[in-house]
Amino acid sequence: MIYSTATVPVNPEGETPLTRAEAWQGLERKARDARLFLPAGLCTRCDVVEESPTHFVREATTAGQDLREIITLEQQSKVTFFQAAGPREGAIVNELFEDEAGQLQLRFYCYIGLRGKEPNGPEEQAEQAQFDGETGYRAALLSTLKRTRELLAEGKL
């Protein structure tokens, strides 16, 4: 199993401040259409195919792999991506919270496995290293906040 976590401040010094509501709008937009937030060409399809009061289902093609995710939103707080189909199984979470100093933080954490692969085998170890590395989820959190600021500046948030 792969467990990874990363936390970044939503409003580091020198950046345009985001309110919790603005940061949340960015997270919700990313959940509905990852293409707006990922590097160009990485996600070639991202469609909400089902919606209910408690969740929505998104189908996407990312890095050439088809995914189906059940996504729940805890308003202004947490987005959880349950991996229903694709190479991974488990859950990925993006969470907004205030730290002990009252500063808004964005945390990623996941607990997932790779379908059809040996637990803790070479594929899972490689995925773990990618998640925890310089281009992993900490970088993804930072790019999500950057893109949220851009959408806000463009009046699209």
Image (tube, rainbow, N blue to C red):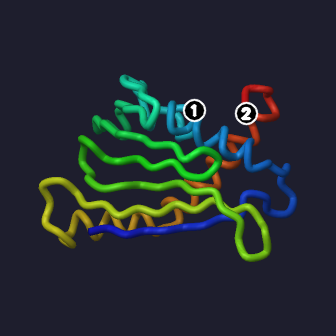
User: Which residue in the structure is indicated by mark 1?
Assistant: 36
Identify which amino acid the numbered label 2 is placed on. Answer: Leu
- Between the C-alphas of marks 2 and 1, the distance is 9 Å
Q: Is residue 119 above or below residue 113?
A: below
Residue 55 horizontal/vertical position (percent): 42, 36
- Residue situated in front as seen by the camera: 62 or 73: 73
Where the C terminus falls, by quadrant?
top right
Q: Which mark is residue 120?
A: none
Residue 107 horizontal/vertical position (percent): 58, 62
Q: Are marks 2 and 1 in contact (CB under 8 Å)?
A: yes
Query: Position of 105 compared to 101: left or right?
Result: left
Identify which amino acid the numbered label 1 is placed on. Answer: Leu
Q: Is residue 152 above or below residue 115?
A: above
Q: Residue drawn at (43%, 68%), measured in percent from left and top?
A: 4
Q: Which mark is residue 151?
A: 2
Going from N to C along the chain, the mark reached first, 2 or 1, is 1
Label 2 residue SS: helix
Q: Residue drawn at (51%, 38%), measured in percent from left and top?
A: 31
Q: Residue drawn at (73%, 43%), measured in percent from left and top?
A: 21
Q: Is residue 81 above or below residue 60?
A: below
Query: Position of 32 compared to 130: left or right?
Result: right
Residue count near mark 2 (Cα–Cα under 10 Å), binned few <14, some 14–19, many ≥20:
some
Q: Residue drawn at (58%, 38%), measured in percent from left and top?
A: 28
Residue 138 horizontal/vertical position (percent): 56, 62
Query: Position of 125 compared to 73: left or right?
Result: left
